[in-house]
Amino acid sequence: MRERTGPGDAPPVGRPARVGGLVRPLLSLLAAAACTAAVVGLVQVAVGTASGQRLDQLILSGAGEHEGPLAQYAELAVETVSVPVVAVMLALAVLLVLLRRRPGLLLPLGSLVLGANLSTQVIKHVLVTREALGPGIDITPNSFPSGHTTLAASAMVALVLASGRARAVLAPLGAAWTVAAGLGTLVVGWHRPSDVVGAIAVVAAWTFFILALDGLSVRRRRARAASRPGHGRRRRGSAPSGHAPPARRGAAEACAAALLSLIGIAGLGYGLFGLLSLPLPLVLHDTAQQLSAFAATAALIAGGTAGWMALTLLLRAPISHRARRADRVP
């Protein structure tokens, strides 16, 4: 009779251990491609067509006319996006990585921040130029995409990914700060709405690309460990070293991802419905249309940012259970 193996037993001799972990990297690559396509689409529509520029102008005018708490908080938030503040955030991310003894995260997180900001500058100064394609279109001094929003979003997501269990709290707070900073660039007239959306899409694309590479790296390490069953000494009752340990994801992080997902769905739904409900043709000097368009765009940006952060929590490679130091045999 063939002996059956339990979930904690080593795989039978001659049979390779099953190594999973391919779904998350593939989904991450798909999400990165979708974000890249969104950037290209924004350039073609919001920057390259007269109708897209008119909608952009209507929303920008609404941001300038808005006098509620949203505009006030957004204006305060954008003032915090400075080199000293971002430097402190990145230094804290490095410190957390070192305290968690995960120095391997330094390279991917550094690549995320550097890649996103360099991409924004190349798109802004080399690939995309903005020209007024119709009457009543104001040209903002900073072109597509927003450098301030890119800096805030990239520093925020690097801190979240470096923070370990604290990411369940930092992810919603960081998403709210990024949204407020992005809207602040509209309130003070530095950028147009498409610039902010494009910046978040750029950072999201880099985030998912880095998560895909990290997921593939984790899968490769598991495969290497599974190919050497019984390697090394272990205590009685501990899992064999060749068996891939179960992954873990904290309940708090799962709740944060669920909350962000709900906010994302609600924000995207409300924002899209609000923009599609605007009467045509757009009347650029109509204050009611301006405020409605800005409210819908604020919801759209909030929903998109929340959805990006929820996917970041869900698609990152979970940390595997590790043996306690007292259980290891030198």
Image: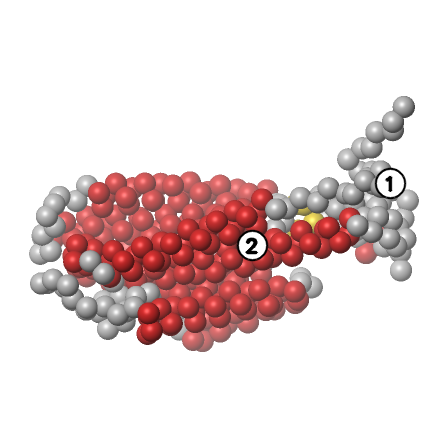
Q: Give whichever of 163, 270 is nearer the camera.
A: 270
Q: Is residue 118 above or below residue 3?
A: below
Q: Give whichever of 320, 9 is nearer the camera.
A: 9
Residue flagged by tag 2: what amino acid is it? Ala
The tag on residue 13 is: 1
Residue 25: give x, y in percent of width and height: 57, 50
| Picture quadrant of residue 211 | bottom right
Q: Secondary structure at mark 1?
A: loop
The tag on residue 212 is: 2
The first of marks 2 and 1 along the sequence is: 1
The tag on residue 323 is: none
Left or right for 138, reference 327 = left
Q: Residue at x 26, y 70 (%)?
A: 129
Q: Quadrant of the C terminus?
A: bottom right
Left or right for 196, reference 53 = right
Left or right for 118, reference 124 = right
Q: Residue at x 70, y 49 (%)?
A: 320
Q: Give whichever of 218, 309 is nearer the camera.
A: 218
Residue 288: give x, y in percent of width and height: 13, 49
Mark 2, mark 1: which one is toward the viewer?
A: 1
Q: CA distance from mark 2 to mark 1?
A: 32 Å
